[in-house]
Image (tube, grey):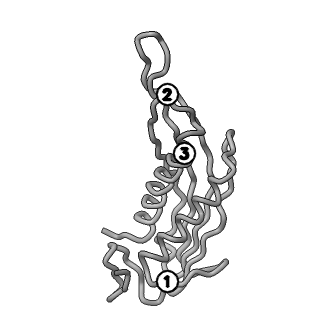
Amino acid sequence: MTACVGGYSFTGASVSADVKTFSVETFINRATIVQPILASELTYALTNKIKSSTSLTATDYDGDLSFKGTITNYSITPTAISSDDKAAKNRLTITIKAEFINKKDPKANFQQSFSRYKDYDSQLSLSDVEESLIAQINEELVDDIFNKALVNW
């Protein structure tokens, strides 16, 4: 159920009655390591989250609520070392800088960095787990942006 009654939805989103549209610009990938699908997947995930959690209508640009962002970090680092001095776990970290503009309530505007990570067994190659890890991290990043912008608890 995603109906909005009195400005609130069952997802916890708080949207003013005069807000009708939203737009999400494609994220720009400025990370040192550029993963080709990351920007489009993140943009798509944020758009779908807003569509499924609010009664707002998506527009290509210039929505009442506007989202854009930059991927600033995509890195793999060892996190646990085994007894033979090899990595037992690796960590994929994605950091983004998101900007939110609310035309109806400029006090709600923000620019903020969000970072999430997932660990994986170093016996697996990144290519074996990368798509799944990106999906999981994107979901968490999208929740962070959505909650900051639209959940006013």
Numbered label attached to residue 122: 2
Q: Which residue is mark 1?
A: 56
Residue 141 lies, in percent from the top left, at 48, 55
Residue at disc 3, secondary structure: strand
- Which numbered disc, 2 or 1, marks the residue closer to the eye? 2
Residue at image point 42% right, 71% down: 150
Residue 81 lies, in percent from the top left, at 44, 18
Whether residue 8 sits left or right of residue 143 in the image: it is left
Q: Is residue 29 above or below residue 16?
A: above
Is there CB contact under 8 Å for labels 1 and 3? no
Numbered label attached to residue 94: 3
Whether residue 18 sits left or right of residue 28 in the image: it is left
Tag 1: Cα neighbours inside 10 Å, few (<14), some, or many (≥20)?
many
Q: Is residue 133 above or below residue 47?
A: above
Residue 22 lies, in percent from the top left, at 56, 78
Q: Earlier in the sequence, mark 1 or mark 3?
A: 1
Tag 3: Cα neighbours inside 10 Å, few (<14), some, or many (≥20)?
many
